[in-house]
Amino acid sequence: MPKPIEVPWRSGAATGVGSLPYDDPIEATRVVLGELPDFPHLPELPMRGPGSDMVGRACALLVELGVDLQPSGWRLTAGEGLDQRRARSVLAQDLDALEELTQGYSGPLKLQVTGPWTLAASLERPRGGRVVGDYGARRDVSQSLTEGLAAHIAGVRRRVPGAEVVVQLDEPSLPAVLRGSVPTASGFSRYRPIEESEGTELLRGMIERISAEQALPVVHSCAAGVPFELLRRAGARGLSFDLTMLGEADLEPLATAVEDGVALLVGAVPAVRPEEPPTRAAANGRRPPPPRPPPRRSARVERRGGHPYRPVVLAPDGVRRGRGGQRCRRHAKLWPRGGRPRLGPDRDDAGPYGRRPPRRQVSGTIPVRSSASARSGRPARSPAVPPVRPATRR
């Protein structure tokens, strides 16, 4: 008999993964509270710049560990850097917007933070190399992130007293860490795989601290090959995954997790930008475009190898585009069946640095072989052919 799942949200409630294409925290929080009133979340706004993405926000939560932003990414330093202080300031602005717009709110509230293994695969050590390749460094980063996350949960409770906090650990790099496919700086080598026992232990320490703060721990991974059994043993009370990345081998671990009382947060709706914002369509007196339907189960089974869901329209001449068929037909007229572009006088044959110079026209005669010429041994020539413009290469 499956155990009853006790979660603070109602059945069928919708929430967001975390990131939104905005740069104003007030507007982003207002959209989240208006569109997802049953299960809102604290939005992440990567368009605001460094420190606003998932890794930058996790760096803002680190305690007694300094980081700085380098051209290759975030790197551990001896002291707190300017970029880390900027990331903490951005997080404080997001929390101020959340506190301002959630006055009197009571219900579930989801927070997102980068998990310990993804953060270890993204951070660099002071002398080069990823933190995931150093046993002591990844332990220190995990403990520092755990303490900072506990303080973050307490701060959100003070700002939103009626919130039932749900903490989502983002672990998109966890499958790569366990397989040993995280590339080194040169790209010619890979870091050694992490044993499942160590991966479970590191996640269990953070999940137990989240539960000690009276919050519900959920682990999210949008990659293929998510180790659901490992996450269940680590103590996750919720599993969030992308439906298009789900394979047949993942069904049995998910069934075991459900029988153990673990909630499932299924990513069924593609996170794509609409063709036209609904507010602009309403202002112009037109109805907004309907939402894109979620992928069907049959399509999910066919794509169990890890390919993302994206509609593809095949034109008659083999032109592949990811948008409407009208654009495909327009491009198909410019491509003959041989595979090279057919450029007419109305086409601009311009390269990346301006219009190309006109090519020379080719004219002349083509030698042919007739019976009379064959007897005489001299090749005959056909009449002159009209000028032909040679095909250009892309």
Image: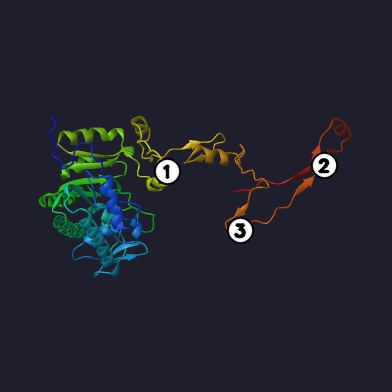
Q: Is 86 situated above or below 41?
A: below
Q: Residue furthest right?
A: 376
Q: Nearer the viewer, mark 2 or mark 3?
A: 3
SS category of the residue bearing label 2? loop
State whether residue 377 appears in this view.
yes
The answer to whether residue 378 is left or right of residue 81 is: right
Q: Badge 2 is on which residue?
A: 384
| Amino acid found under the numbered disc labelled 1 | Gly
Per the model, the C-alpha gap separating discs 3 and 1 is: 41 Å
Nearest the viewer among 117 and 218 is 218
Per the model, the C-alpha gap separating discs 1 and 2 is: 61 Å
Per the model, the C-alpha gap separating discs 2 and 3 is: 34 Å
| Amino acid found under the numbered disc labelled 3 | Gly
The residue that appears at 23% across and 62% down in the rendered structure is: 92
Image coords of residue 342 (percent x, y) = 64, 43
The answer to whether residue 218 is left or right of residue 343 is: left
Image coords of residue 76 (percent x, y) = 27, 65
| Amino acid found under the numbered disc labelled 2 | Ala
Q: Nearer the viewer, mark 1 or mark 2?
A: 1
Image coords of residue 134 (percent x, y) = 24, 58
Q: Crowding at label 1, few (<14), some or many (≥20) Cα neighbours within 10 Å?
A: few
Q: Badge 1 is on which residue?
A: 285
Image coords of residue 63 (percent x, y) = 18, 63
Label 3 vs 1, first from the N-terminus: 1
SS category of the residue bearing label 3? strand
Q: Are marks 3 and 1 in contact (CB under 8 Å)?
A: no
